[in-house]
Each structure stands twice: as structure tokens, then as C-alpha cells.
Image: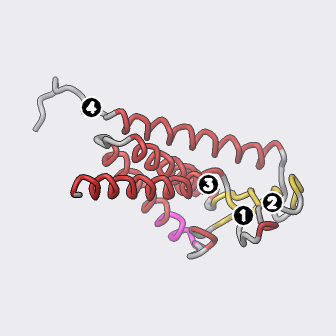
Amino acid sequence: MKPLDAPPPQVSPAGSLAYLTALIVVFADQISKAEVLYQLDLPLRLQIPVAPPFFNLSMVWNRGVSFGLLRAGQDIGRWLLVAFAAAVVGFLIFFVRKAERRLLGLAIGLIMGGAIGNNLIDRIRFGAVADFLDFSGLYFPWVFNVADSAITAGVIVLLVDSFLVEKTIASKKA
């Protein structure tokens, strides 16, 4: 047991970057959704051409996970997704505190921010995720949002970081 006057746990610079990145992603995601939902008042499935035919704004409520899979039609599914996302975010918050590589911190921050924006805030507030960025003119079969983009970018950065670490380890062995 720690004494009451123990210093607070230290967060590495990469961990701080992760927390800041997550905060920025959540803010950008929620502001963009507020614009679409309340300022534009975009009706369901109406398309507003932005850069036709490649990019439109289209309001879609996603009750499932990625690409609408595993739709949570009942309230229990919604809350299971919220609980799972909360557990993942909690693990990442703990894990990234001691991260040493800034690229890893950036990747985890993007993933955390996206998970908080989509799977926690949206599902708690609305019961579904608000998607509106429609690139179907480029043959993407889905509509997504800022949080989805951050998660995707975070996974890509995580793969790049992993590749760079493996390359460094391999060069040290040679």
C-alpha cells in the first residue's frame, strides 16, 4: 500500500503526447458532429455534395461496429460495446503512461481519442455512432467520421512504429 503522501505516478513525454492527441481527436470529432447534427441539421441519408462525385456529407447512424458490422439493435448490445470500449480505453490510458517512443504515443492517442469519441460519447448520448463523411464516389462502401479516421490513422502509425522498432532491433543484431 502506498503512503498518502506518495508522489503521483509520472507520465512519460510519449504518454503526455498520447493524452493530448486523444483530447484533440475527441474535441475535433465532437465539434464536427455537432456541426453536422445541429448546424447543418443533415437529415438521414440526404447527401450534400462537397466535391462531387468523390466526397459528400451524408448522415448515417451506425449501430454496429466497424463498417456497420455486428449491429447492436438492442440496448444490451449498445452497453456491451460501451463497456468494451471503456475497458480498452482504460487499458490504453494505463499502458501509454510509460511509453518511450513518441510515435507509439501518437498512435495510441489517435486510437484512444477515436474510441472515446465514437464508442463512448456517441453510444452513451445517442445509442449509435454519427457518421457523415461519405467518400462512396471513390468506391468506399461506407460513411465514417473524424473518430473513425483517427482510429485508422492510429493503427497505421502503430504499424509504422512497430516496423521501425523491428528494423532497429534487426540492425543491432547485424
Q: Is residue 17 visible?
A: yes
The three-letter code of the residue at mark 3 reads Ser
Label 3 to label 4: alpha-carbon separation: 30 Å
- For the image, the number of numbered tags is 4
Quick one: label 1 or label 4, which is nearer the N terminus? 4
Image quadrant where residue 27 sits: top right
Per the image, the residue denoted by label 4 is 10
Quick one: label 3 or label 2, which is nearer the N terminus? 2
Q: Nearer the viewer, mark 3 or mark 2?
A: 3
Span of residues in magenta? 72-80
Quick one: label 2 or label 4, which is nearer the N terminus? 4
Residue placed at 51% from the left, 57% from the top?
156
Label 1: how many Cα within 10 Å (few below 14, some 14–19, many 20+): many
Left or right: 63 in relation to 134: left
Q: Nearer the viewer, residue 102 or 144?
A: 102
Whether the magenta-drawn stretch holds residue 76 is answered as yes
Label 2: how many Cα within 10 Å (few below 14, some 14–19, many 20+): many
User: x and y percent of residue 162 in the render?
Assistant: 38, 57
Q: Assign a secondary structure to mark 2.
A: strand
Q: Assign a secondary structure to mark 3.
A: helix
Image quadrant where residue 45 sits: bottom right
Label 3 to label 2: alpha-carbon separation: 16 Å
The three-letter code of the residue at mark 4 reads Gln
Q: Nearer the viewer, residue 119 or 57?
A: 57
Label 2 to label 1: alpha-carbon separation: 7 Å
The three-letter code of the residue at mark 1 reads Val
Q: Which mark is residue 164?
A: none
Per the image, the residue denoted by label 3 is 149
Per the image, the residue denoted by label 2 is 58
Q: Is residue 87 visible?
A: no
Label 3: how many Cα within 10 Å (few below 14, some 14–19, many 20+): some
Per the image, the residue denoted by label 1 is 143
